[in-house]
Amino acid sequence: MIKIDNITKRFGDKEVLKGISAVFKPGQVNMIIGASGTGKSVLLKCIVGLEIPDEGSVLYDDRDFIRANRNEQIEIRREIGMLFQGAALFDSKTVEENVRFPLDVLTHMPMDEKQDRVNHVLSRVGLENVNHLMPSELSGGMKKRVGIARALVNNSKYLFCDEPNSGLDPQTSILIDNLIKELTEEYNTTTVVVSHDMNSVMQIGDYIMFMYEGHKVWDGAKEEVLDAKEKAFNDFVFANHLMKVLKEQMG
Amino acid sequence: MIKQVGKYFIFLGTLFTNRESFRTYVQLFIDESVKIGTDSVLLISIVSVFMGAVTTIQTAYNLVSPLIPDYVVALVVRDMVLLELAPTIIGIIFAGKVGSNIAGELGTMRITEQIDALEVMGINSASYLVLPKLLATLFTYPLLVVYSAFLSLLGGYVAARFTGVITPQDYTYGIQYQLNEFMITFAMIKAFVFAFIISTISSFMGYFTTGGALEVGKASTSAVTNSVIAILAADYLLAQLLAEFLAAV
């Protein structure tokens, strides 16, 4: 479980995050949604430690990440897997080397065991016989799947995905969404997904948090989305044509 | 400017803290040594041979006097090669080739979030990425300087032989005449200092790139420009410090 409390972040005079609190539970897909520029990615960076919040705390299973010393932070980080927006695969390494990378650097596992683990996660994300391809030879969807495999190869307890559907066609988006959902349930990871894609939110989101101008405006389960009263949230949700149709059909 | 210098020294400090295990760096060091050192051999060979040949011909044409023996041409070429041409000029060329490559590579890794990916995994990205480059440059550049000095002197010999500006016998006598061995030590000290400057400044420029492709290009340019300026400044300081010592021994 990840608990964030009163996260505030400023860049100069501009307050980008304004006291955000939430609880992300394991085994479910927690989605942070909002329009571009509302601070979703900054919040994600604060949670994983790529940015240091000016106020507030981030607790990973009751371990305070921000106030932890360097070694404790490293220990927590080694339980984190992250899928970046552009997958962030290492250009100079093959698919296999990319996926094996956390095991190579962070563990003393024998090579055979590492190889088995790599093959297992690659097959789990539906990628076989691509071990020796370079990232430049992969499609956008394949890169994301390799990114997910790399994020999970070290048995990560926490999975973060930054805009996993960006730049993908609708079919591949659904495939990636389903993969995130399945893996979250299978490995019981605490998954946090940043997205602005309502189709994805309604498909895989268990807990949804909506951000607007640095504030948390609404949070709840996806079943509650249509009943929400907050104007900013409704404007965002019903900008999606399918959501608008759904709302009309449901009266 | 002062802020940047401070940031540079803090950056250098991070290279040596929270490092990964030794075994992680061994393969990286070998890979970087190949990329930085071996891949530079051809360019340095070509430049060195021509540098030695041209220096020999030009020195010979400028030292035409019945009072100056011919072997002095080779002696001048030797001193120029050992003190300046091999460590400094090759350093500038090396900064252009390797420095821009390092900054471009790290800059691209930064803007494509590959560096963030390392950090999220709990890896000290600065140490993981930059330390092997620094060690590989410190290891390969002095070797390249020795190689360059040898080829420059060889280039001078070839020029002497084929143009006839001095006889090969005078040339071989001249390059051995009253050799002060400290000059070689001096060249090696310069090589280590310049290797450190090139690798760290280029890495610093690349590592802190923000933005997109345009900024990666700018980082590469800044890496080369700043490295060259720093090399020239360090060259001057070392010349002041070590030349006095050279004169004394």
Image (cartoon, coloured by chain):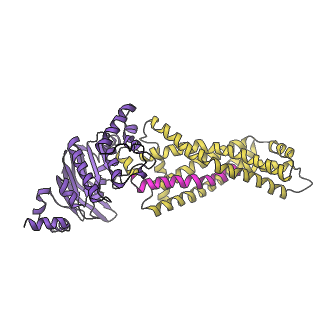
- Residue nearest the viewer, comparing B19 with A176: A176
Which residue lies most toward the left here? Answer: A251
Residue at 84 percent across and 58 percent down: it is B61
Residue A20: image x %, image y %? 22, 57
Q: Main secondary structure of the magenta part?
A: helix
Quarter of the picture containing the N terminus of chain A is: top left
Q: Is residue B199 left or right of residue A107?
A: right
Residue A104: image x %, image y %? 40, 37
Q: Is residue B235 left or right of residue B176?
A: left
Q: Is residue B102 left or right of residue B57?
A: left
Any magenta on residue A201?
A: no
Quarter of the picture containing the C terminus of chain A is: bottom left
Residue at 26 percent across and 57 percent down: it is A171
Q: Is residue B220 left or right of residue A65?
A: right
Chain shaded yellow: B
Which residue lies most toward the right here? Answer: B66
Tally of numbered discs: 0
- Residue nearest the viewer, comparing B76 with A200: A200
The answer to whether residue A221 is seen in the rendering is: no
- Residue nearest the viewer, comparing B135 with B178: B135
Residue at 39 percent across and 45 percent down: it is A95
Residue A23: image x %, image y %? 18, 50
Residue A165: image x %, image y %? 29, 57
The answer to whether residue A183 is seen in the rendering is: yes
Q: Is residue B80 above or below residue A232?
A: above
Chain shaded purple: A
Give the residues in magenta. B85-113
Any magenta on residue B99?
A: yes
